[in-house]
Image (tube, coloured by chain):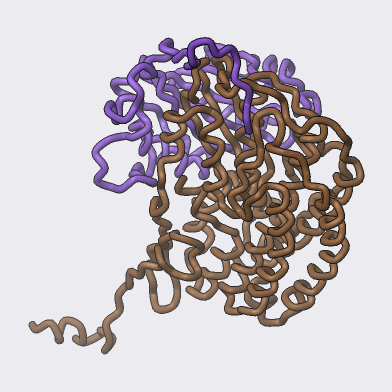
Chain colours: A purple, B brown
Amino acid sequence: MTPDSGKLTSQQALEHARDLLGKIARDLTISDWHLVIDVRGDDLPEAALRLRDDEKLSCKYIISIIGVDYVDWMETLYLLRSLDHSVPIRLRVRLDREKPEVPSVTYIWSGANWHEREAYDFFGIRFLGHPDLRRILTREDYDTHPMKKDAWPHRVRRTEWRWENIEKPRRLPGETDRRDRS
Amino acid sequence: MSVTDELTGPGKPSFHLEEMVLNMGPQHPSTHGVLRLVLHLDGELAVSVEPVLGYLHRGFEKLAENRTYLQYLAMLSRLDYLSGSFMEWSYVRSIEALMNIEVPKRAEYIRVIVSELNRIISHEVAIGDFMLNLGAVTPFFWVFRDREDVMDLLEMVTGQRMMYNYMRVGGVRWDLPEDFEAGCRKFLKEYPAKIDDYEQLITDNEIFISRTLGMGIIKPYEALDYGLSGPNARASGVDWDLRREVGYSVYPEFDFKVPLGQHGDCFDRYKCRIEEMRESVKIVEQALDAICDGPVNLKLPPMLRPPAGDIYRAVESPRGEYGVYLVSNGGLRPWRLKLRDPTFSAISMIPKLTAGNKIADLVAIVGSLDLLMGGVDR
């Protein structure tokens, strides 16, 4: 975990990405030495192409595509990495939860194909222009997208449906602090 | 016109030519667990190959949302059951990073020792399975015989042979037992000779060479494009190893090489694994020399509550980059846990890699990728 082992620092990568993407990037932040770039869904293919073909940032390697359900909205994250410098880049797209749609990046990275299928399978995110958008891990006739927070209301602890509803740790009366027994 | 006329009319061959669809797996000895391949065959040639996943899907990511951080720890080594410690490691690393926990130095050394021993047995199974796919039964028994020594060592440390459940947030579960070091040094002394034995048996074998050399070639840019990592990518010449590039844990202190292949064929993938086993032996030796005294665990509350935020942490597992993306809302349970498995990316390459090959070669190519469905199907 050495943030400065690469040729680019996170700050340099951020400034370069800002020049490269211009108005496409709605927001650029550094989170834990990863560069996080927020883009709109429509701009995603353009941003992805520029990041991939840029000489400095050259994100040739796609680690994963991750869907997250925040109940009020959804997100897809594209974890990218270049082998020339070690600042991983996350492209973040915020989606409408009622109609989660985002352009596919399969023609930019071939490896994105199955990760997009997985995100579709788990969250119902539709990747427009994907060559073969089918379920991948759950069965074909499954009637729900299981990773959505409201997919199985009877199986999920109801208090934890919402982001803000954090459960307080349960302690016995009079108990101060239990140590890890393991 | 009768059916027979249609098939054997003028200008038609006297036999029926048609693409045959064949299901290979999910219960096939050479498809590594429950991978199902739908083959479209033209004679012996596979015209197209389509992997079908999900036969081992257990909903690991969903289950994480209903368990506390520590409860979930016990499940992780069931994912990629041959290299369980790496799953645990990436998971505890992500929590430690979220909570800003500094792990005691001794615990980091123990983690490295356990994980590198684990890498050795994982690669042994990879090689044994690969040879079994090619029809050679002897190496399979050899690796399983030698694997027992390492399993005994790991059982001594963790109490388990495969599902370790040994890493904890802020350290490891307990310290190394007293007689571990002597046993481990004895093993490390004997083991390189055993690798030489494998090489003598396999690497110079003419049948093995003719079946793997130049077979299933992955170009470096293809490996990146498909997101391959680990030995599969390094066999293609992609010089990337998280242990060296990111330098997590105490890896920067160790002197080890990252073996690279030149052609990216099945032979190079096998050879990379052999060389990595040798490097792992070196790393464990150095770790045993450098290990310091001190605590192996931090006193943490039983209910961990990482602050709200998201984090991605990865380790170099025997199959490549094993990553955990964790979203916490500050509660007792993960809001979202994504497990990034390297084999998932490797399998997505099978259609491109194997189409146009004969079935026998297809088995060799699939075997050389070292697939394990436990982590893929999750």
Residue under the image location 40 percent in, 78 percent down? B43
The one nearer the camera, B61 or B15, is: B61
Q: Residue extending furthest front?
A: A174
Q: Residue extending furthest bottom?
A: B14
- Rendering coords of residue B291 (x, y %): 87, 40
Q: In the drawing, does residue A49 fall left or right of residue B292?
A: left
- Rendering coords of residue B322 (x, y %): 61, 41
The one nearer the camera, B167 or A180, is: A180
Q: In the drawing, does residue B60 fall left or right of residue B299?
A: left
Judge whether residue B302 can be spotted in this image. yes
Q: Is residue A39 above or below residue A55?
A: above
Q: In the drawing, does residue B75 fall left or right of residue B313?
A: left
Residue under the image location 69 percent in, 23 percent down? B299
Judge whether residue A48 can be spotted in this image. no
Pick the quarter of the image with the C terminus of chain A.
top right
Residue under the image location 49 percent in, 48 percent down? B376
Q: Residue extending furthest left?
A: B1
Image quarter of residue B104: top right
